[in-house]
Image (cartoon, rainbow, N blue to C red):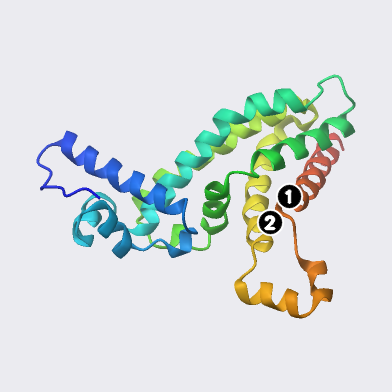
Amino acid sequence: MENFQRARSEEQREIRRQAVLDTTAAMLEEMPAGDVSLNELSRRVGLAKSNVLRYFESREAILLELLDRAWRQWIADLPALLDADIDRAAPVERRTEQFATAVARSLAGRRVLCDLLSSQAGVLEHNVSAEASARYKRAAVANVASVATLAGRHLPELGEDAPRLTAAMIMAIGAVWTHAHPSEAMLAAYRADPSLTAFKLDFVTALQDMLATLTAGTIARASS
């Protein structure tokens, strides 16, 4: 925990701002985004809650910035993973499956990214200003475009529909993550009635299946 004096220069303000981001990032490694509170964040970073809000307008604004950071880190690692797992000489059906598998596996260890994506539209975008919303959305559009470029490199059959596929993929990641991580009450229900476990999802397997279906369907529509 740091004990900060009042920031009096832009450099000092940036140091405080990065401290808030880094402390929140560390909290996200310990707990889901829904459990991150401004009270605990301010305690850990060594600033009063009112001072934390000098640097970010809300808890959600902090989490949106960390979502963009995690998203860009994933994009930076994705090209090598796709190059390793996709055979460009293979038929399109095979490349479709390889693409879906590679993307799903690339997210297996990125709990923070998936958790934040699952909260993006329903929670994180609801307590921020129009300015912060626009700033985040511009970053998200750029991130979608970057993934679309990678998808088109390995699946040129997507044509101009690659961005549409990528946008659908991002929504699917958040949705599958939520359903693959049920509440404690639901887990207890599964234990009490094993027949209900038919509805329990494995994140990577379910996401792989959904991405393969989305990709194949987008290619089919693009070719019709």
Percent coordinates x, y for residue 85 in the rendering: 76, 28
Point out the residue furthest to the top here: 89
Name the image quarter holding the C terminus.
Answer: top right
Q: Which picture quadrant has residue 167? A: top right
Q: Which residue is mark 2?
A: 176
Res 40 visible: yes
Relative vertical location of residue 48 with respect to residue 136 in this rendering, above or below: below
Label 2–label 1 contact, CB within 8 A: yes
- The residue positioned 45% from the left and 58% from the top of the image is 124
Q: Kindly identify the residue that appears in the image at 44 percent across and 64 percent down.
A: 35
| Disc 1 residue type (three-letter) | Leu
Residue drawn at x 80%, y 33% is 98
Q: Is residue 145 left or right of 29 when viewed as pictured?
A: right
Front residue of this view, candidates 47 and 96? 47
Which of 202 and 55 lies nearest the eye of the viewer? 202
Residue 170 percent location from the top left of the image: 63, 47
Amino acid type at circle 2 is Val
Residue at image position (52%, 49%) is: 112
For this view, does 173 lie left or right of residue 202?
Answer: left
Disc 2 and disc 1: Cα gap in Å?
6 Å
Identify residue for label 1: 207
